[in-house]
Amino acid sequence: MASSSRRRPSATGPSSRRARLRAKATRIATTGDAVAPILTRALTKTYGDLVAVDSLDLEIEAGEIFGLLGQNGAGKTTTILMLLGLTEPTSGKARVVGLDPARNPLAVKRRVGYLPDSVGFYGGLTGRENLRYTARLNGLAGHESEARIEEVLGQVGMADRADTKAETYSRGMLQRLGIADALVKDPEILILDEPTAAIDPIGVVEILDLLRELADEERITILLSSHLLSQVQSTCDRVGIFAAGRLIGVGTVPELSKRFGESTARIEVSLDELADHEAIERARGVFAAVPGVAKVSPPDRKLAPWVLLAAPDEASAVRVAVLAAAAREGLPLTGIRAVESSLDDIYRTALHATGLAGSRRVAA
Amino acid sequence: MSGAEVAMTTPAPAEEPQPAVRRLPSGWRVVAAKEFADHIHSLRFGILFFVLGLAAVVPLYFVATTLRSAAEQVSGAKAIFLALFVFDAQPATGFTIPAVYGFVGIVAPLLGVAFSFDAINAERSDGTLPRLLSQPIYRDHVIIGKFVAGLAVIMVVLVSVVLLISGFGIFRLGIVPDAQAIFRVIAWLGFTIVWVSLWLAFGLLLSVVIRRAATAALAGFGVWVLLQVFGQLIVGLIAGLVAPFQSATSDAAYLDLKNLSDAINRILPLTLYDEGSRVLLNPTKVTVGQLAPTLGQVAQQQQQIPSLLSLDQSLLLVWPHIAILVALTLGCFALAFVRFMRQEVRA
């Protein structure tokens, strides 16, 4: 929505924006290069008997987008709260921009923008007034503050709705305003808890594009948590898989798929939906006879593709062979594609591999 | 990795990089300013202003009528201006309208609870608390700011009402206060603000402890009704059972029992407020208690040259009352503060 209002030239004009970015780059250069912006060592949080976060070692580099994946209750939010100094760790260390959030919360919060899970705003105030309150709490006032608010509202595409009361906003708009709110203080680190929840699909793309831009152009380090894996996959430089308070895998998506991905390649083959019974019966034999095909699963419902399993390194050879066999046997083939191991698969396999599937925690 | 390890092991505060950020404002001021603006613009403010205004104007009307009809007798009477606040009007026989301070004593707690019962729990249920606490302010500044904002609003309301009454007295009745009367009214105003802030702190405590704003409001107003309406009844009964001073046989026993009965009655904060107000607003009051207890004292009182107490003497008389109300307020606030500081950000 409202894509026309995005990237609207802000009241500050490009020169002051450039000046701000330059100032920020120097600031990050003097503080951020020596230490990773976010660093934890054996970070642990227990609530009574419940271990919400279990000796977490995490290192996030400047300007990267790091995705924290996990089910509800895996310990993502608890980790985030510890990084912000909103909850004290039971043991272990956390450093955010080189500072200990438990001992120096104000300095950390000054430089970290945070979008909480299911963010809320004061309904009686307009979006702009809500942001103004945040700006004031961060020591911004007057012209500088107004210009900054205008800029972030434009960035999240909320400029044209900023002057209506927040109680009239939809969830998606609240979410956008929440991101603007986190950006008002001009943070070095952005921590977003479920940033794309409740946003419509087009909005999600816009938001993820914005995050990419913030990371690339402003060198903001972004930590986001999500359980919508496919969205995270396309945006994050690296992801960490979280289950039952433990980080069971960290890396880029290809790295993780190498480690946790299925050991067989999946090839989906579609036949013409009008194919008769005889053709389908014939197809089963033809596919099974193709060299390299380990298993043939016929579709479990109409229009679903056949699934052929093969060894990963033979996958492309098998596809060629299937096409050739279909042409030879006159099968009404309409489509064939290799299915890459998605983050969903990786996630599921990782959970199973570590025996943590289905284990949920009460404290999210 | 090794560079990171080095940084982890040397967290000396002196080495921590101090970025050139703008000086942060005092967090509680920002919170208080925002909350104050919210209160002033709220419907709640309008309603309570109206209710409290009514609580002041109704007795004032009857006092004024009584004063006008008895203008000859009262002219030249001492401390006539203060009568506007303390005079129990009797527009008809057997029918007494409590004085202004009595009405204020009953209604003002509403004001306190109403401006604080949803201070924290509403932030929680609206999902604004995590966002607020992730800003660079100390957590205690949130609750202090809210308390200060509530106090400021209450002061606005009470000062306006008192000015209204005074203005009415000056313009309609032609009663001009002397300096002594003005100081007494100011002292009473301060005392009333303490009284209301006790309820403000109590409401704040409820808003921290009770997660739902509606439940907190119900609890707050429930306690208010219990104490204001049934409290005096129940405590009076208990005092009557424990210290039946009317049936005492000797003057000494009567005096002891009466003192005990008064002490029991003073368990109620409202009694403290009542007694304190009466002394502060009435320079002829030389004792705190409500009745002249013994025959001997009655005789003594009759022989007394009717004199006016100076304000500092009156203050001295009710100093314990003020101290207890302040202590109760601070106690409630401290409890709310501690509970809030220990609460998890998430429910």
Image (cartoon, coloured by chain):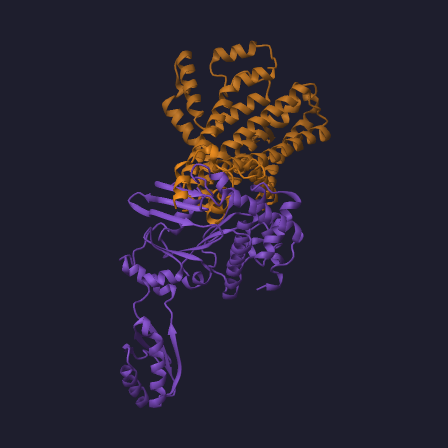
Q: Nearer the viewer, residue B71 or B317?
A: B317
Q: Supply the letter of whichever chain is orange.
A: B
Q: Colour of chain A?
A: purple
| Residue A89 seen by the camera | no
Please tell me whether residue A166 is drawn above or below residue A280 in the rendered image: above
Q: Indicate the position of residue A355 as horizontal and vertical percent values.
A: 26, 58
Q: Indicate the position of residue B24 as horizontal and vertical percent values.
A: 56, 37
Residue at 29% x, 87% y is A281
Q: Is residue A22 left or right of residue A342?
A: right
| Residue A98 seen by the camera | yes
Residue at 59% x, 48% y is A22
Q: Indicate the position of residue B271 as horizontal and vertical percent values.
A: 48, 27
State which quadrant residue A143 falls in. Answer: top right
Please tell me whether residue A107 is drawn above or below residue A284 in the rendered image: above
Q: Nearer the viewer, residue B221 or A59?
A: A59
Q: Indicate the position of residue B127 as horizontal and vertical percent values.
A: 48, 49
State which quadrant residue A84 falls in. Answer: top left
